[in-house]
């Protein structure tokens, strides 16, 4: 295999991915299969750092994997697996945690943000060491590149520092990965609050288009999307964030450029745009929902696919961990 290797993960924290997850992350994974040697992981270990329900986690892990398959992650082409099925992740994380400085870990802004609400004293140690587990995810596969959003850049930097530190302390073991920042044009905003990103955790349900939501429900959310009092359909994220967000989604799902769309909508109103975007979203989601349901209706097949993925992953992860263990004296 001479193509560059990438590792990327997504948390199983909800019963459906939303359009932001798809357009901002997963769609790029699908495309990268053409050019990279891909390892894609449903990161269930990362999903227990802030309290969780075991049955919900089990269901969400499966539904996440089913959706990834449904949108075009090809389990023959890529390794698609569940993080907890590959024990090397947790094992390497321990070793890496022993070469991470407490101060260094304390500088991670995601922990500061996520612990701000409940307070540091009530946050789990797992939330604190989350970026070290993420470093283990990346380094185990000797990944060259990690496709992430801007918010994850600091964690990839930590992975680079830990790889370099391990290599210089114990001898060459890990590839030093590069962050590959996914382009901003794919950013999708909350339909009800179009200056904030569409987010499972922060948006109201009416602001989020879920991949697995009924087409009618999504069409209704789009019809109720917040727009401004003007009437002209122009792309102006600063002054018309609502309309611009709808155009971004429309363009991303159809491949039509923003210019083509604004020309086509000259003289038409927001109502037309919203109605037609509802239909675009429905056309896009219907086959994804059908394929997801097929995997969920055949648990044995989903288990088989995920077992093959875990086996592929371990073919790289096990020798990497063995080399690291040997270097540290185990
Ligand atoms: P959420 O904010 O809904 O909890 P996550 O933080 O779990 O979503 O994001 C998972 C992936 O989806 C990340 O790679 C992130 O960059 C991407 N993503 C999430 N929301 C959006 C959005 N509104 N627009 C573009 N990409 C997004
Ligand atoms: Na989030």
Image (cartoon, helix red, strand yellow):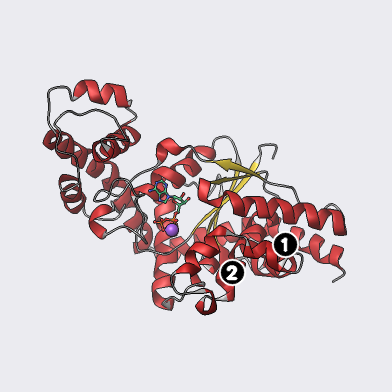
Q: Which residue is label 2 attached to?
A: 128
Q: Is residue 308 visible?
A: no
Q: Position of residue 208 (x, y in %)?
A: 29, 53
Q: Position of residue 165 (x, y in %)?
A: 79, 56
Front one among 59 and 246? 246
The local crowd at label 2, few if under 14, some if 14 to 19, many if 20 or more residues have their Cα within 10 Å, is many
- Separation (CA) of disc 1 from disc 2: 26 Å
Q: Nearer the viewer, mark 1 or mark 2?
A: 2
Left or right: where 194 falls relative to 1:
left
Q: Position of residue 195 (x, y in %)?
A: 32, 46
Q: Is residue 323 visible?
A: yes
Ligand 2 - quadrant of the structure image: bottom left
The local crowd at label 1, few if under 14, some if 14 to 19, many if 20 or more residues have their Cα within 10 Å, is some
Q: Which residue is label 1 attached to?
A: 318
Q: Label 1, secondary structure: give it.
A: helix
Q: Compared with residue 72, is residue 130 higher up or lower down, i.e. above or below?
A: below
Left or right: where 289 falls relative to 329:
left
């Amino acid at each position: 295999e001479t193509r560059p290797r990438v590792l990327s993960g997504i948390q199983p924290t909800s019963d459906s991915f939303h359009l932001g997850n798809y357009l901002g992350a997963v769609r790029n994974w699908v495309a990268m299969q053409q050019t990279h040697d891909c390892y894609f992981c449903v990161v269930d270990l990362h999903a227990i750092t802030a309290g969780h329900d075991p049955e919900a986690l089990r269901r969400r892990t499966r539904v996440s994997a089913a959706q990834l398959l449904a949108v075009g992650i090809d389990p023959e082409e890529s390794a698609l697996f569940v993080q907890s099925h590959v024990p090397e992740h947790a094992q390497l994380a321990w070793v890496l945690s022993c070469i991470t400085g407490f101060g260094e870990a304390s500088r991670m802004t995601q922990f500061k943000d996520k612990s701000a609400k409940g307070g540091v004293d009530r946050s789990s140690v797992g939330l604190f060491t989350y970026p070290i587990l993420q470093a283990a995810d990346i380094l185990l596969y000797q990944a060259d590149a990690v496709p992430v959003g801007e918010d994850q850049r600091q964690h990839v930097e930590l992975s680079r520092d830990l790889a370099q530190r391990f290599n210089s302390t114990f001898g060459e073991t890990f590839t030093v990965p590069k962050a590959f920042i996914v382009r901003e044009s794919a950013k999708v905003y909350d339909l009800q609050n179009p200056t904030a990103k569409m987010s499972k955790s922060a948006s109201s349900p009416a602001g989020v288009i879920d991949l697995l939501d009924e087409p009618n429900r999504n069409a209704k959310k789009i019809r109720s999307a917040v727009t401004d009092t003007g009437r002209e359909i122009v792309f102006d994220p600063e002054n018309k964030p609502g309309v611009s967000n709808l155009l971004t989604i429309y363009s991303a799902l159809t491949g039509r450029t923003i210019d083509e769309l604004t020309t086509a909508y000259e003289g038409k109103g927001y109502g037309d745009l919203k109605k037609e975007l509802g239909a675009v979203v429905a056309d896009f989601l219907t086959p994804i929902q059908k394929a997801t349901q097929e995997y969920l209706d055949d648990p044995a097949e989903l288990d088989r696919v995920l077992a093959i993925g875990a086996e592929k992953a371990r073919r790289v992860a096990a020798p990497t961990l063995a080399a690291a263990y040997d270097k540290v004296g185990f």
